[in-house]
Image: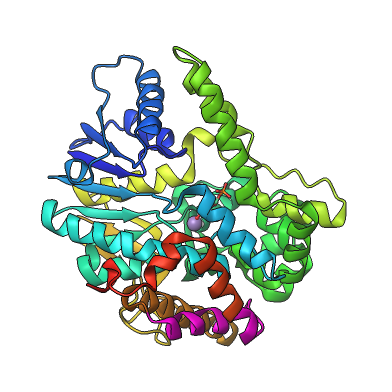
Amino acid sequence: MKLAILGGGGFRVPFVYQALLQDPGSPRIEEVWLHDSEPGRLDVMADILATLAGGAEAAPRVHTSTVLDKALEGADFVFSAIRVGGLAGRVCDERVALDLNVLGQETTGPGGIAYGLRTIPVMLDIAHRVRELAPDAYVINFTNPAGMITEAMQGVLGDRVLGICDTPSGLGARVAAALGLDPARVQLDYVGLNHLGWMRRILHDGVDVLPALLADDDVLGTLEEGVVFGGDWLRDLGVIPNEYLYYYYFNRDAVRATLDAGQTRGEFLLQQQEAFYERIAKASGGAAMELWRETVTSRSASYMAEMKGARTGEALDVQSGIDPAEEGYARVALSVMAAISRNEPATMILNVRNGPTVGALPADAVVEVPVTVDANGVHPLVLDQPDLHQTGMMQQVKAVERLTIEAARTGSRTAAVQAFALHPLVDSVPVARRLLDGYIDRIPGVAAVFEPGAPSKK
Ligand code: G6P
Ligand code: MN
């Protein structure tokens, strides 16, 4: 089978390739096409993957191309993990917001809206190319903001596109490890939108172990979510929120921590990335892989814990509990492919079309829920409905996501202003207007959305 990876120069690609190398099943991926807009990055990545393959005969063949159509043609699976506007775009997403004293974050809050605005037109073009060149392919979308992007692409590709985020399954894996449970016997009752969900039950052989976990501060202290939310708040809520809810429940603290740090996460990563490519240019031979490994392992396991530690003065060194080689991102993607191509049914938490799953949301909204995947596609499980608080937040943020999609597709400034103003983390209409103006000023991809005759409007 052929796998196309869009964003093929990205830092997480080696994890995916490593997982493919270890895949003993049949059919399997024999050909990997890396697509990226920057040829230099593709060369570096091809070099790293060749080192990983170590000349093994069965290793999937790697091709690189800056031509999208070549990568897509006849693909069985398409992974999309692109960053439209690059890390420089992320820096603007975060900075423009932070300068107005609201959360400056990649996917949550105004940063996520700006990111969505410039990414949706590009992803819609890609969806049309996939429909044309690889009509039977499944698109596994990691491109953020993943929920919004998946929903926009479903308008073109229907259920053949599904969105993946590593955070819900990562939480499940960490809980299982912390409690010494066999992950294969653990079922997760989770509901939400991407980066906005709640783990409501953790069933081990059908018995809910969440109440015992919530009562145990020692075990909670080893979990990222336990550290960032604190045992007391988790017990008050009675569920474990997705780590991204830190930005809602501790909004002021997060904004303050970033202001105090004087640097956003994007600014840190941009520096790191520039240093990486500078050093690569001077290195030779298998050095690229060593540099890559050094770079990915020097990223903190939990940025939120780092923020909280900086606020409270505690040394909160949270381990993710997962070997980076088995990074969640790759693991989930590989299970999806195996489930579809080999009819090995698997249950996982994905971003999919809601249908009747959450009654309080539109049927064509994308939600993040447990689903079974098999050769016939994706089947959401029947769920207990979210409570009033969860429903309210999901509805509010879904309204913002849909306004963002509308703005990106039609160029409507009204929809864009509404998206910023109605976001729960933007507390003022004048600030919403300044956000939109700031993003249009600073980010060409956002400005392009509102220009007459922009490609997205054709
Ligand atoms: C998690 C999220 C991704 C997000 C990433 C950011 O993996 O699920 O959606 O892009 O964190 O990590 P970074 O190291 O780029 O801040
Ligand atoms: Mn994610």
Q: Is residue 217 above or below residue 183?
A: below
Is 407 magenta? The answer is: no
Residue 410 visible within the image: yes
Q: Is residue 360 above or below residue 374?
A: below
The image shows residue 328 at horizontal and vertical percentages of 47, 45
Question: Taken as a whole, is the magenta stretch helix, strand or loop?
Answer: helix
Tell me which residue sits at (53%, 36%) in the image.
324
In this rendering, the count of numbered labels is 0
> Which image quarter: residue 53?
top left
Q: Quadrant of the C terminus?
A: bottom left
Tell me which residue sits at (85%, 50%) in the image.
314
Tell me which residue sits at (18%, 46%) in the image.
69
Q: Quadrant of the N terminus?
A: top left
Left or right of 294, for residue 186: left
Residue 205 visible within the image: no
| Front in this rendered view, residue 111 or 48 | 111
The image shows residue 137 at horizontal and vertical percentages of 18, 52
> Which image quarter: residue 244?
bottom right
Q: Specify the color scheme.
A: rainbow
Is 422 magenta? The answer is: yes
| Front in this rendered view, residue 401 or 388 | 401
Left or right of 246, for residue 412: left
The image shows residue 129 at horizontal and vertical percentages of 18, 56
Tell me which residue sits at (73%, 75%) in the image.
236
> Which image quarter: residue 235?
bottom right
Residue at the right extreme, as displayed: 313
The image shows residue 227 at horizontal and vertical percentages of 74, 55
Residue at the top extreme, as displayed: 285
Q: Which residues are magenta?
A: 412-432
